[in-house]
Image (spheres, rainbow, N blue to C red):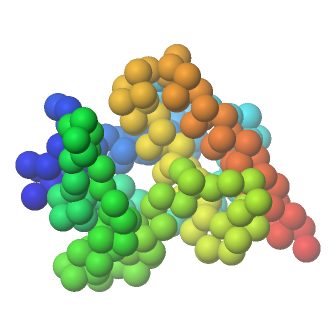
Amino acid sequence: MMKSCEQTKGLSVLQHGFSVKNYLFDLLNHLRHNTPLKYEWFLPDWLYENKDLILSTLVDDKTLKLYTILHDIGKPFCLTIDEDGKRHFPNHAEVSYNIFTEYFNNEIAADLIRRDMDIHLLKSDGIEEFCRNPNHITSLIVGLAELHSNAFMFGSLKSDSYKIKYKRIQKNGEKIINNLKNKKTI
């Protein structure tokens, strides 16, 4: 189903999942091994300044791959198309969680799937609650990778839509990292 359902014109939900995984591991290989980035990125200062702390809190690679590839597994089951022909996937994170848990036994990936939209919808006043999730740094880093993977849907890394989304994740990421650093020093 993921293969035959379009995320956006010319890109299936499954292709989107693989794209997010590829971007994520491009970034992780860069941070872990200083390899050159394959894709075009704008990376926030907090990422480099806190690289070791970030890398030490991420879930394992097997879970990251499972999560990123299948994070939208429920989209084919909740697809609606409005009168303008625009695709919508209402409640797709919960639908994806439910389908994922029927077929896979990975509680961490399941929880990440259920909370997949949290980083993208996060407002400044929700940072403290967001940080209560033990996998909040994984959500942040995958969110950054997904934003870059999706940049072409917004027009490019130069589009206003991308810049708005990047600015939000940049600011929220800094607050999230500061929250983590404060917990480590207590």
Q: How many marks?
A: 0
- Residue at 37% in and 26% down: 152
Q: Residue 174: percent from the left, percent from the top?
A: 76, 47
Q: Quadrant of the N terminus?
A: bottom left
Residue 72 image position (x, y, % from top left): 30, 58
**Left or right position of 67 against 148:** left
Comparing 53 with 24, the one in front is 24
The residue lying furthest to the front in this view is 83
x 50%, y 20%: residue: 159
Q: Residue at x 29, y 78 (%)?
A: 98
- Quarter of the image for residue 12 reads top left
* Frontmost residue, 114 versus 134: 114
Q: Residue 111, image x and y in percent?
A: 45, 75
Q: Is residue 165 left or right of residue 64?
A: right
**141 or 82, nearer to the observer:** 82
Q: Quadrant of residue 153?
A: top left
Q: Nearer the viewer, residue 116 or 136?
A: 116
Is residue 108 at all visible to an observer of this figure? yes
Residue 4 as seen in the image, left or right of residue 145: left
Q: Quadrant of residue 118?
A: bottom right
Q: Which quadrant would the C terminus be assigned to in this image?
A: bottom right
Position of residue 17 measured from the top left corner of the image (x, y, whole percent): 29, 49
Question: Which residue of the protein is positioned furthest toward the right in this rendering?
Answer: 186
Q: Is residue 89 left or right of residue 126?
A: left
- On the question of residue 177 being in view, the answer is no
Residue 186 position (above or below residue 179)? below
Vertical relation: 100 (above or below) 55? below
